[in-house]
Amino acid sequence: MIEATSCGGVVIFRGKILLLYKNYKNKYEGWVLPKGTVEPGEEYQETALREVLEETSAKASIIKYIGKSEYTFNVPEDTVEKDVHWYLMMADSYYSKPQREEYFVDSGFYKYHEAYHLLKFSNEKQILEKAYNEYLELKKNNQWGAKRYY
């Protein structure tokens, strides 16, 4: 069993959510949230911000920790058990550019119901739902973007 840890973000700008479309040699295709592997010596928040910037070119800031998703998948030599720590983030614009080296071919900001249906993985849908509810609560209380919560 290989254990792996990643961090990512549910990035929101003006109520819309940033998604990436990955197409890896036509074997893996689908919309995902930006995330990536923690590098040695890196804090989880640093990983999440770095991965969002690398994969999407979007400048974002962390608002709040959302939670962790866990899943396993198989690689030829073993089974990988992965933990992903998620953060609610606010982008500073609608700008995004997919990272081609990681096989991302499209990116963009989508309305919640569109993003929810586009996402490939159920665990990312659950994180999106949790993050968006946090966003709505902060917005309702006029706290969205006012300060950081981590």
Image (tube, rainbow, N blue to C red):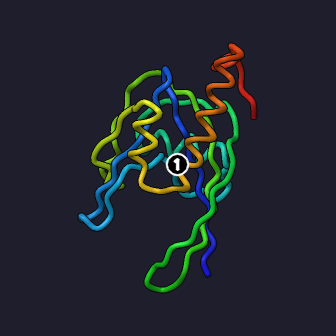
The residue that mark 1 highlights is: 125
Above or below for 19 versus 6: above
Going 63% across and 41% down the picture, which residue do you hit?
A: 130
Residue 90 is left or right of residue 56, and the answer is right
Q: Splitting the image into 4 quarters, where does residue 113 fall?
A: top left
- In the image, what residue type sits under mark 1? Lys
**Quadrant for the N terminus in the image:** bottom right
Image location (x, y in percent) of residue 89? 58, 33
Image location (x, y in percent) of residue 18? 44, 36
Q: Considering depth in this image, is 106 or 114 the residue closer to the camera? A: 114
Q: Considering depth in this image, is 103 or 67 the residue closer to the camera? A: 67
Q: Secondary structure at mark 1?
A: helix
Residue 91 is left or right of residue 56, and the answer is right
Q: Residue furthest right?
A: 150
Q: Residue furthest left?
A: 26
Going 70% across and 40% down the picture, which residue do you hit?
A: 65
Residue 71 is left or right of residue 77, and the answer is right
Q: Residue furthest top?
A: 142
Going 35% across and 54% down the picture, which residue do you hit?
A: 30
Q: Splitting the image into 4 quarters, where does residue 5 fall?
A: bottom right
